[in-house]
Amino acid sequence: MSTTVNEGTAGEPRLLDPENRHRQQDLLRVENLRVGFGEKRDVTEIVHGVSFSLAPGECLAIVGESGSGKSVSARTLVGLTGGSSHVSADRMEFDGRDLLSFKDRDWRGLRGKDIGFILQDALVSLDQLRPVGKEIDEALKLHDWGPRRERQERVIELMELVGIPEPEVRAHMRPYELSGGLRQRALIASAIAMDPKLIIADEPTTALDMTVQAQVLEQLQAAKARGKALILISHDLAVVSQLADTVAVMAGGDILEYAPAAQLFSRPEHSYTQRLIEAIPSAESRGARLSPVERKASLGTARAYEDAGAPVLKAERLFKHFRGPDGVTRTVVNDVSFELKQGETLGIVGESGSGKTTTARLALALLEVDGGGVTLAGEEWSGLPERERRKRRADISVIYQDPLSSFDPRWTVEQIMLDALGEGYDSKAARKARITELLEMVGLEAEHLPRRPLQLSGGQRQRVAIARALGPQPRVIVCDEPVSALDVSIQAQVLDLLADLQDELNVSYLFISHDLGVIHHISDRVLVMCDGKVVEFGDADDVLLRPHHPYTKKLVAALPALERPEPTGPRPFGRPPRKGRPAPAGAPDYSEELAA
């Protein structure tokens, strides 16, 4: 049975698998690990006495939200917690060695050689000025693999092993010249260069396309098959279900539940685990709420748009060409057409390079079209001079993927919102009242006004981004990967918030994502793009449950499947219908429960 870890007395170790703690084959044993940060008496404990073990050929997944302590626990195993950290444990052994006695020199000898570490963002983790072949060679050179010629041969062998095509050519390319999937595979090649016994993968598939994600998971699965132990850090439970043998669920520095993966996903015991599983968007959750959090604030003076029947945004035969550094002109948007109705969500999906974000930028008139045109609210949009478009930009706004990079880090929330409001307010007090109202609409309060982006959590920053997009009271909001980097529960709250706002304001969304579960949950219709072209278009259920085009079928097949728990008790898994939206076919009726 799964082990639900209850809070103990101070200093009491939380031993998670007491029946198997002393397995002879264990490669890694950790008991009562505690990690804190600070100086002298001012130390804040982040990890509160957790324990786990791992054998060769096994995968332990540690899941939880940001701040749960999962990455800190993993970094402790390779001595990367920093100089201000305080680490203690009853036992922390790897391959018979006592990690608690390690000095800096010992850690440098361990990292890369015996424990490989795959970081989340390959574009940041790899040196942009150095070819990826040299990046992989660096791991070999540091540990005296052999002479240069042998190392070069090993680099090509590693790149072939992780599935990088034309490795002799790609080895001389810099990270920014490679796709996200190729960069991530290069990072994996660097991590396994010395054939380590343990691989730690920290969010290795976050923000990757479904097909690329599947390729990365295949490489990690192959490492397991070669007898490598694997620790997977992730908030994506569907990914975890494909790879993990055992799962530890962390929250607030504690492990709340520890069990075999199949058992944990089919019969989760801890309420926190159940909430994480329920928060995953999918076909089954379409038309229903993902989060128990309800938005209390009224919409006040916000404008609600009526459906006039005509499309609020219309794109006709869009073309866009770019000239590359090699002098070759490529067509990145090729004869794309669509219509978006008032109050509707149109999802756009496709792999990196499919043209979906460029299409969105054409719709926003942030790029000039090379053919075709866009109309907004029935009037010409793309063909106007910018000085004329500026008067109507309030009708269409955007929520970007990473609000931290789209905000000025020096500005407070109040300054960010003031910039979005523009003119039309009689006084400073009226503008501040409107800003406070907008923050309340997205679940924030006036106390957030003086804070800067770095003083906000990821979920709070995304809520500010939504409030900023709502500021000019637009008819259309373009959502460009707005939840891809969020924890599953925060993602659920943001998706519910967007749905609530749409139900009450009748705003339209052009929603771009690589996550088919998110797209299926929130979209009315779906447009699938490949190599700049539309290959499939229609109702969300028709496209994603009954795809016709081979490319769409490939995307759907790459979506990780998560076994849903069996219904338990009076309230089965699933959400009550969203206000203003019909429940999906077969959904349970919660009307009496909600009334109570």
Image (cartoon, rainbow, N blue to C red):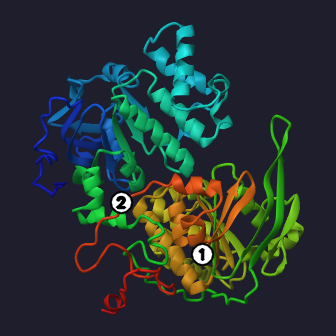
Category of crowding for the residue at label 2, using alpha-carbon neighbours closer than 10 angstroms: few (below 14), some (14–19), many (at least 20): few
The amino acid pointed to by label 1 is Asp
In the displayed structure, would residue 318 be above or below residue 568?
Answer: above
Quadrant in the rendering for residue 565: bottom left
SS label for mark 1: loop
The residue identified by callout 1 is 524
Q: State the image coordinates of residue 265 (x, y, percent, origin top left).
A: 30, 58
Q: From where the camera sits, is residue 414 visible?
A: no
The numbered disc on residue 470 is: none
Q: CA distance from mark 1 to mark 2?
A: 25 Å
Q: Which residue is mark 2?
A: 563
x, y percentage for residue 284?
44, 71
Above or below, 500 against 237 in this view is below
Q: Nearer the observer, disc 1 or disc 2?
A: 2
The image shows residue 181 at horizontal and vertical percentages of 57, 41
Q: Position of residue 539 (x, y in %)?
A: 62, 73
